[in-house]
Amino acid sequence: MRKTLVLIGFLFVMFNLQAQNNLFLRFQGGPSLPLSDLASKIYTIDECGGFAKLGFHRGVDIGYFFNKNIGIGLMTSKNFHSVDTKSWEKEAFEPGIDSIVEVTSDKWLMNYLMGGIIFRYPINDKFQINARIFAGVLNTTSPEVEIYALEFNQTEIYLGRESAKSSVFQYTLACGIEYLLNNSIAFSLMANYSSGRNKFEYMQALEKDVQQNSVINFSGGVVYYFF
């Protein structure tokens, strides 16, 4: 709800600027590649990676260009990443020792609300290069993970980690290209790198678990320019 109100307020201000073809709204989505600790498959007493798989993201951008090249923008988006439970099974227990091993997990959820500077450089009447430098808030929910093992001697082993939340400062860098179908509609392709340092507090841990969670979002979308 808070994000929706921010977007509506931002859009209202942009409309009142009444500048032709400088205000836009973009809807986009596509695959999300996890990096750093988010994609790590380390599992030890002292460290546990995110085991995140290739995910998906969706988002909305609103922006206004002051002139031909520079403007300001606001972005909200959401990432979904499943957990690689097969790799977690291999790292958590030695192969051949455990007769039955099962890992179940929720998804990683990442919500972004960011704003900053946007750039564009027209190549010709149809194509233009876009870029942005944004900063803002990243709200991350780590997945709840349950690990169950039944050994040959019928000994049951259960390990688990509850879900946790973290809100941190985040920055993002993006670059892409747009194809202008007409004065109002454009198709866009964009690569977006984001990184933030999350701190999760789990009940079993004596200290907070710190993770450098980074992603590259590859987006395809539709842009609408207002008049």
Image (tube, rainbow, N blue to C red):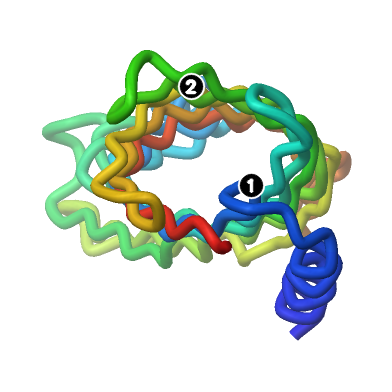
* Front residue of this view, candidates 128 and 47: 128
Classify residue 159 as left or right of residue 202. left
Write the residue at 50% across / 56% down. Answer: 225
Name which residue lies at 28% across and 30% down: 126
Residue hosting label 1: 22
Q: Residue 112: x and y, percent? A: 67, 53
Q: Is residue 124 above or below residue 151?
A: above
Residue under numbered circle 2: 175
Question: Can you see residue 195?
Answer: no
Distance Cα–Cα, label 2 vs label 1: 19 Å
Q: Secondary structure at mark 1?
A: loop
Residue at 33% from the left image edge and 31% from the top image edge: 91
Instruction: Locate the N terminus by quadrant.
Output: bottom right
Determine whether 174 is above or below 86 in the image.
above
Quadrant of residue 194 in the image? top right
Q: Picture coordinates of residue 19 (x, y %)?
A: 72, 53
The mark that comes first in sequence, 2 or 1, is 1
Label 2 SS: strand
Q: Residues within 10 Å of mark 2 (few under 14, many from 20)?
A: some
Tell whether label 1 touches label 2 (CB within 8 Å): no
Find residue 209 and name its label. none
Amino acid type assigned to the residue bearing label 1 in the image: Asn
Q: Is residue 83 left or right of residue 45?
A: left
Label 1 Cα neighbours within 10 Å, binned few <14 / some 14-19 / many ≥20: some
Q: Nearer the viewer, residue 222 or 166?
A: 222
Q: Front-most of 186 and 90? A: 186
| The image quarter in which residue 140 lies | bottom right
